[in-house]
Amino acid sequence: MKKIRKDDNIMGENEEEKKLNIENEEKVQENVPAKEEKTNAEVKKEETKVTSEKKEEPNFKKVETKTKKSKHGVAKAILILIGLLVVVYFIFVMRNYLILNAICKKASAYKDVTNYTYHLKGNSGEYTASVKDNISRMDQTSVENEDRTMIIWSDKNTGETIVAFPNQKTAQKNTLLEIPLAVPFEYVNIDNRIMGMVLYTWIYTDEFDGKECYVICLDSNYKEWVEKETGLIVKKESKDSSTEITNIGINNVDEIYKPDLTGYEITDETNSIK
């Protein structure tokens, strides 16, 4: 009888151990899914974060690349524009140089001319100038006042000068008044000015008095018409005045007459010169 009870006790203990084991396994099984679910949630969260970062990173790089390309495009456009302006200005300067140089070469043919005549018409009046061997005469008429009509005669060989007013019958001798001679020939001696003029001078073509001309704009208020064929100035124009030079003749003066001062009241300015 004692033996049977002992076995019964052993069996009871085994059953209790089994129950405990089963309960522990159940608890482990209950805990494992929760742990797995938590892990899966964390994994999903991390995957979402990584995916979001991956999505954002290309967009950021795309915007950054687009900005760089935009800045690069603007800089490139500015450089191209500057390059074009430099090329245009270079062409402008070279064209000016070629034209002005051609004008000077043609005008230089008159460098040693001592016999010529021309007619000049301006806002205040007009005059005819004649020159031969350092003797010159200018017959001028005034639009504003007929009493200002005058004759200027000069002999550089002797230094004698006469300014006569025919309508007033008065005259002055040996004055310091100079005749504006050689007006058409001003481009004869501008070789040393060409390099400066080519940088800013605007030149275009026009016709005056039946002649093909270059119009040389030295500034916004002053222009000169220069005959293409001869390099001689045929017209000047400023903001307030205009001067036309016509009837230019070379080696066509036979003699220059000294004014006849008979009946004139003459003033000699020699004594008044200090």
Image (spheres, grey):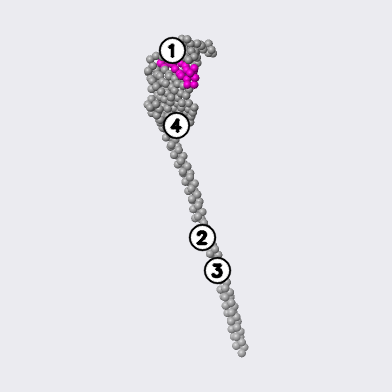
Q: Comparing marks 3 and 4, which lies closer to the viewer?
A: 4
Label 4 sits on residue: 202
Q: Position of residue 230 (x, y in %)?
A: 38, 25
Residue type at numbered disc 2 = Thr
Badge 4: how crowded within 10 Å, few (<14), some, or many (20+)? some
In which quadrant will I find the N terminus? bottom right
Q: Comparing marks 1 and 4, which lies closer to the viewer?
A: 1
* Cα–Cα span, label 1 and label 2: 109 Å
Label 2 sits on residue: 51
Q: Which residues are magenta?
A: 131-151
The numbered mark, 3 or 1, whose residue comes first in the sequence reads: 3
| Residue at the image position 55 percent from the left and 68 percent from the top | 37
Q: Secondary structure at mark 1?
A: loop
| Residue at the image position 44 percent from the left and 29 percent from the top | 216
| Residue at the image position 45 percent from the left and 26 percent from the top | 236
Residue type at numbered disc 1 = Lys
Q: Is residue 54 above or below residue 128?
A: below
Label 1 sits on residue: 258
Q: Which mark is residue 37?
A: 3
Badge 3: how crowded within 10 Å, few (<14), some, or many (20+)? few
